[in-house]
Image (cartoon, rainbow, N blue to C red):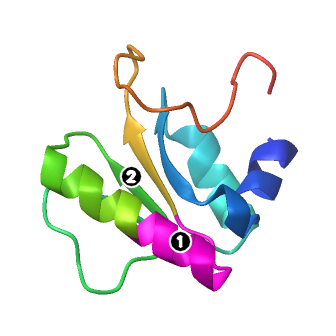
Amino acid sequence: MGKLAERLADPSRSGVYRIRTTEVIEEAAALNGYSLLWVDGALPKQLPHVVLFEKTDAALLKALKDHATDARKRGECFFAALVDPEEKAALAPLYNERKS
């Protein structure tokens, strides 16, 4: 748990990942004082530090990846996580829950 909160505070790790469940990331975001948003297709103009989503298409994934890249360049934290309980998405896991 502590390691995930540290990861969310590291701008160099900003990106788009997959997660199996939301509880741990919700807790880690709260520890960092980050706001969290569930999106379903359309992105608002202002994004919080953490975005969760369950469905994706190429356009949404590209927009999230572009936003993460821009955040990293600015030295800001931004994490988007696809809720993927079956671990089928071609995204890196945000954390290794077996080690957490």
Label 1 residue SS: loop
Figure quadrant of residue 13: bottom right
Does any portion of residue 79 appear in the rendered image? yes
Q: Residue at x 60, y 71 (%)?
A: 72
Residues under numbered marks 1 and 2 in contact, where contact means CB atoms less than 8 Å apart: no
Q: Is residue 68 magenta?
A: yes
Q: x, y percentage for residue 49? A: 53, 71
Q: Quadrant of the N terminus?
A: top right
Considering the whole magenta stretch, tell me its main secondary structure: helix
CA–CA distance in space, label 1 to label 2: 10 Å
Classify 77 as above or below 21: below
Residue at the image position 38 percent from the left and 13 percent from the top: 86
* Number of on-image labels: 2
Query: Few, some or many C-alpha atoms within 10 Å of disc 1 (few <14, some 14-19, many ≥20)?
Result: many
| Residue beneath the point at 80% across and 27% down | 100
Let me know if residue 53 is in the magenta part. Answer: no
| Res 40 visible | no
Residue 92 point in image, percent of width and height: 53, 32
90 on left or right of 54: right
- Of the numbered discs in the image, which one, if any, rests on residue 49? 1
Q: Residue 68 appears at what percent x and percent y?
A: 48, 65
Locate residue 29: give its quadrant.
bottom right
Residue 52 percent location from the top left of the image: 38, 52
Q: Amino acid type of disc 1? A: His
Circle 2 is placed at which residue position?
52
Q: Is residue 24 above or below residue 28?
A: above
Q: Which residues are magenta?
A: 67-78
> On the rendered structure, is 16 left or right of 8?
left
Callout 2: few (<14), some (14-19), or many (20+) C-alpha neighbours within 10 Å? many
Nearer to us in this view, 55 or 61: 61
Residue 63 placement: quadrant: bottom left
Q: Mark 2 belongs to which amino acid?
A: Leu
